[in-house]
Amino acid sequence: MNSEPGDASAGTGAAASDAPGSNADSSRCVLFVDDEPGAADLAATHVDRLVDGIETLTRLSPDEGLEVVRDGRVDCVVSDFDMPGSNGLEFLESVRDVDPGLPFVLFTGKGSEEIASDAISAGVTDYLQKGAGRDRYEMLANSVANALGRRRAERDLREVNAKVTAIHEFAAELASVTDVATVFDRTVDDIEPVPLDEAAERAWRTVDTAGATLDASAATDAVDADPERLRTLLENLFTNSVEHGSTSSRATPDDGVEHGSDDADDLTISVGSLPDGFYVADDGRGFDIDPEAATEYGRSSTPDGTGFGLAIVREIAAAHGWELSVDDRDGARFEFRPES
């Protein structure tokens, strides 16, 4: 293992590349560091064949390997021990300074009880000795797969903990709120021109439309809005139309049609621009209760309705400074205009 460090090479993974940031979101990057080019490539080749969903990179010195680690592209490091300038444990210390939780497998041909003890004390993820035969590389591949699994589980746990913390903080703040309007003051952030047709299509894809049809051909202008809040407003309006509309705008409670069912094949929901705002309308049967009352919290025309959907629409509109008017002469129609 006395070859001079040369140009770094990429492993044999299908997505392997030396370009920064090149590994796909679905792949995990395993870095092999060994001053013997043939040894690094051989280990990378075997592990790439035995572990799914990874790309492999090889580097010929700890300094070159550390540069890749600093780029933030690496999910696991496999390193030799005896290398010029810096041994594997010194390399481990440098890696830990950059990423304390990065899995690090020491894969060395110079094995001894002393090295193994030092490696464990230094916090390596695993310690394996090189040797002849395929079984050594199978052991290495198993070690890498386990390390990557733990890495992903730890990352998922951190994300869950962060979400739980955020929910707890929100709940604590909410406990001091005395009126509903204050809750929605979470809700309008950056206002920007949002193409109404694109917003409608985006919201439509997230709703169970039960066979209804969206017509956004008249949505020709942009709306100055918070994109996420506008999406929520449209989602609630679409859901309301599907859940409370009917299979025919001509249906009546005595005609045998089960109103408010999922059978909305004949329902069309339209989104369009107004000279001073926009509208969302459907050709269903309209409201069973007063349209204005329908936007109050807890009011629903169906026994299992939450009474939240249209109330949320009203609050989001108010947070944007829009006046909401509701009409049910030919289905349900909601119009939004700037407050005069």
Image (tube, rainbow, N blue to C red):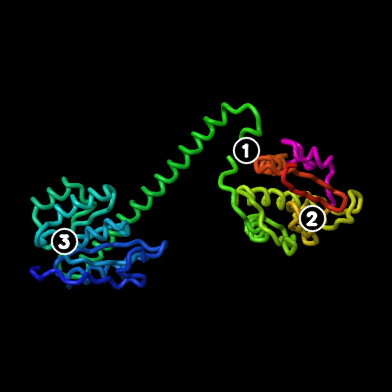
Q: Amino acid at mark 3?
A: Asp
Quadrant for residue 305, please give it.
Answer: top right
Q: Amino acid at mark 1?
A: Phe
207 displayed left or right of 116? right
Report the magenta residues as a range: 285-306
The numbered mark, 1 or 2, whose residue comes first in the sequence reads 1
Quadrant for residue 106, please give it.
Answer: bottom left
Residue 80 shows which numbered tag?
A: 3
Residue 81 seen in this snapshot: yes
Which quadrant would the C terminus be assigned to in this image?
Answer: top right
Residue 282 shows which numbered tag?
A: 2
Q: Is residue 335 above or below residue 180?
A: below
Q: Which residue is more in the foreground, 58 or 117?
A: 58
Q: Within the magenta stretch, is there residue 291?
A: yes
The numbered mark, 1 or 3, whose residue comes first in the sequence reads 3
69 displayed left or right of 225? left
> Disc 2 and disc 3: Cα gap in Å?
67 Å
